[in-house]
Amino acid sequence: MSEDADGTTLDAETQRRVVRERYARIATEESGDEGCRSTDGQCCDGTTAAADADRTAQSMGYSEADTESVDGDANLGLGCGNPNALASLSAGETVLDLGSGAGFDCFLAAQEVGESGRVVGVDMTPEMVETARENARENGTEHVEFRLGEIEHLPVADECVDVVISNCVVNLSPDKPQVFREAFRVLRPGGRLAISDVVLTAEVPTEVRADPDSVASCVAGASSIEQLSAMLADAGFEHVDISPKDDSDRFIREWDDDHDVSEFLVSADITGRKPESDDE
């Protein structure tokens, strides 16, 4: 099979299917079910037991206050950073979370923007959207909503969002340039992008690129800093900054039992801004 645009050897339809299936299992299995949860510290595959989710989140940049402030099963111990820490949110802002999962980052954002603000989460897995909506009811967050949709085709109007956040999700997309074009479309002029994701530091082994489980668990679909910078610039973003986190090898090396993926992956903070007007 030929290599796809994102560097994997899986076609786009297969990538979306394996990711959707993985997240459906995460959303529907109970905490601690060994059918899906076995190793501490995983990124996107849900293998962190619920009892360790708070500790795992704190290792990725969340505070103890963050993890204690959200009720329900919103914190699944997933991700590779803390996008809310990058976003510098203010009261009254509208925030969009790409690949919102069970809603953890959305609920944290909701605390920052307050009831005068608004938070929208988009996820392509129906089971995960249902879980997030249940968590919204438990957290009493009427200014948070969750929509079913793909991040390449956002169910969001043009220029209605102040901040786009995401946590270790863009790497899962088979069409990352389209993700960034959509993020740019929905941002208001002057709006900003603040995401945590993984970036490549070396070539991914062939057997990893071809493995569906590796693609679905944030290991095989990442792009290099140079590639991501070009995608963001092509989408129209300015003031782009991609800053690798040198200490992320602490949890990244735990993501795969057969490979030390920290040899070719690192977590990074990724930010950019939409110009104040299209003609600037």
Image: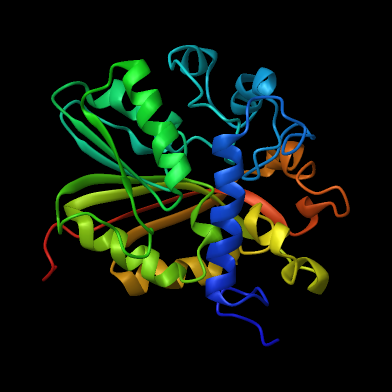
Res 133 → quadrant: top left
Residue drawn at the location 35% of the way across and 74% of the way down: 234
| Left or right, 145 with reference to 82 | left
**Which of the two residues, 243 or 64, is positioned nearer the viewer here?**
64
The answer to whether 35 is drawn above or below residue 91 in the figure is: below
Residue drawn at the location 17% of the way across and 21% of the way down: 115
Q: Is residue 25 visible?
A: yes
| Left or right, 250 with reference to 96 | right
Locate the C terminus and report the quarter of the image it occupies. Answer: bottom left
Q: How is the image coloured?
A: rainbow
The answer to whether 219 is drawn above or below residue 85 in the figure is: below
Task: Point out residue 203 in the picture as x, y percentages from the top left corner.
Answer: 74, 70
Locate the N terminus and report the quarter of the image it occupies. Answer: bottom right
Task: Point out residue 74 in the picture as x, y percentages from the top left corner.
Answer: 48, 26
Residue drawn at the location 71% of the way across and 37% of the way down: 47
Residue drawn at the location 60% of the way across and 23% of the way down: 58
Total tally of numbered discs in the picture: 0
**Which of the two residues, 233 or 53, is positioned nearer the viewer here?**
53
Task: Point out residue 166 in the picture as x, y percentages from the top left corner.
Answer: 43, 46
| Left or right, 12 with reference to 99 | right
Task: Point out residue 117 in the picture as x, y percentages from the top left corner.
Answer: 17, 29
Q: Is residue 108 visible?
A: no
Res 235 → quadrant: bottom left
